[in-house]
Image: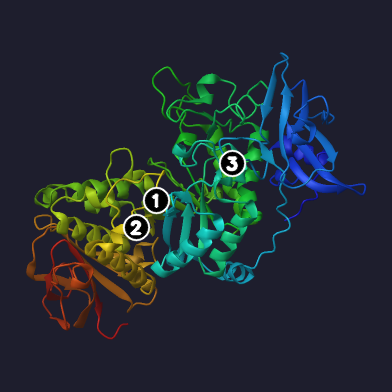
Amino acid sequence: MTWTASPYSEYDRYLFHQGTHYYSYTFLGGHLMEEHGVKGARFAVWAPNAKRVSVVGDFNGWDGRKHPMERMPQSGIWALFIPGLKEGDLYKYEIETREGKLLLKADPFGFWMEKKPNTASRLCDLKSYRWQDQKWQEAKAKRNHFQEPMLIYEVHLGSWRRKNGEYLSYTELADELIPYAKEMGYTHLELLPIMEHPFDGSWGYQTMGYFAVTSRYGHPRDFMAFIDRCHQNNLGVILDWVPGHFVRDDPGLRMFDGTPCYEYADPRRAENRGWGTNNFDLGKTEVQSFLISNAVFWFDVYHIDGLRVDAVASMLYLDYGKGPGEWNPNAYGGKENLEGIAFLRKLNKEVFARFPKALMMAEESTAWPMVTMPTYLGGLGFNYKWNMGWMNDMLRYMSLDPIYRKYHHNLATFSFMYTFSENFTLPLSHDEVVHGKKSLLDKMPGDYWQKFASLRLLLAYMIAHPGKKLLFMGYEFGQFIEWNCEQSLDWHLLDYPLHKKLWDYSRALNRFYRKSPCLWELDHTQEGFSWIDAQDSQQSVLTFLRRGKTPKDYLIIIANFTPVVRQPYRIGVPERGAYKEVFNSDDKVWGGSGQTNSGIVHAEPLPRHNQRYSLELKLPPLAVVFLRRAGAD
């Protein structure tokens, strides 16, 4: 990380206006520094149509007459050095519009902000933190994440756990969340947006301070220490990021200098009614510098490992969330947002040029092709895409009474028609347990026992399905009510046997996944998967095989989506010999009925399911069985 750029440099200004300054946070915003032997702070802000811009704060009584900024030649950038300022000092920009109206704006590039509901920026030194994650960075540089286990724990920091009803600080989260995630066997934490946002109920998805980690949980350097501790414990960190739209609150980016700077000039394109926000003008070069610099900033300054890009579809389609007459077609008469497409390709190209091992994950909810193909092949350039189709189909399937599942067998099998068309992550995310959708456990039909059995079944089926995995907090122990961002998860449920057994099960399943290379080495290639039997819709049973890079490393997975014990149940297998059950979600230790296959099961030379051999086993109710050839582990 270098901080040598300057608003006084014509070259830096040129790159910013051209849309190619990807470290613009090094000169825009408020920076503590020394100029000509005098300590203070240098400020720079882009306000191209302002009549006047001043820096105001506690240090000058919020009087815009005292520190007017200088407009740089042939530029919309204003700059000023103020001596004597220190870390923590509050400031805003007072902007006089062409019409003479005065606006008070937070710094778009500010590194720290006041705690809500206040909205002033704070001066902050991000350069003084000393990182201790060199071993993690060196190991990451040598790894291939496509052929590694990836088990992501999605967390909202404000509601994972609380102390006496109050937020845990970044330091407390480092002490509690990191050991918990490590104990459970997760490989990554994915944090709902931690960029500063005014409204708790937005969960962070209505961002105001794109470069400021939220003050709700502490100081920015405390968040650096949190990430550092994650890396020291072999946990990656992914941040949810919202480059498509921003909050409309007055101190934010909207009409920043009295004119549309960051949003589209056309109100129909700027307005995002569905979320009550404004859409970024992705075709404006200065906005491109702002957003791509922001992505680079989190990798560069905070050492994050990945970004999950929110609402990609809203950037790809001109008609997203709009009705007839509310949008105009592109130059070719289509609904594709050509500027959005070009921006996403540019974003991914520039991030990977600087951080080749970055994770760039698209939350893209449509059938847009080649999301995870490289930009030079015409793709959008992400390296992972959330498999929203799998999630929607499986949650619909699992919510059905088992007696009707045989009529909807395709919901459980359709994902295999396209699962290798992209590099997919299978998400069971926060969006599925809010707004009346019920908790994951409560979506399951049947009595209390069947609900837990069905959730164990779903989690095991997810682990067996090709693709990386993401689970929202609380799923692992059976949070029974919907997620509420205003309160802690119901950790007291672990005092109840079935919830505690589900927690134990989740930990054991995660560990089983991580020690089974055939479940992740070939996640994104057809060679890692083959059907044994996808046709048993009458009994709602699926049987398939997952392979690793070593030919003898494979698991046979049998999933029974009904509460009926199937015995004997014959399946085809690829080799003759002995097989043993290595994991069964119906084990009594997890709260199951105990319908397990103890000992060895022998394959016979009886062809079945296009295999030369077959074997008989006991298939437990609402459960998944994993078989491995004896001697292969």
Q: Position of residue 61 (x, y in %)?
A: 77, 30
At horizontal 64% and vertical 69% (from top left) the residue drawn is 134
Q: Is residue 331 visible?
A: no
> Where 361 falls versus 327 (above or below)?
below
Amino acid at the residue labelled 3:
Lys
| Location of residue 66 with respect to 354 vertically, above or below | above
Residue 491 circle label: 2
Q: CA distance from mark 2 to mark 3?
A: 27 Å
* Left/right of residue 584 with respect to residue 288 in the rendered view: left
Q: Name above or below for residue 155 compared with residue 344.
A: below
Q: Do the CB atoms of the residues marked 1 and 2 lie less than 8 Å apart?
A: yes
- Could you tell me how far apart the alpha carbons at marks 1 and 2 are, in whole angstroms? 8 Å
Query: Mark on residue 488?
Result: 1
Q: Indicate the amino acid at tag 2.
A: Trp
Q: CA distance from mark 1 to mark 3?
A: 20 Å
Residue 15 placed where, x, y %?
75, 40
Work out which residue is located at the far front of the displayed protein and give it.
164
Cβ atoms under marks 2 and 3 closer than 8 Å:
no
For this orientation, the residue located farthest to the top is: 99
Dot 2, how many residues are within 10 Å of its Cα: few (below 14), some (14-19), or many (20+)?
some
Residue, disc 3: 115
Horizontal side of 605 relative to 222 (left or right) equals: left
User: Looking at the rendering, in which quadrant would you find the C terminus?
Assistant: bottom left
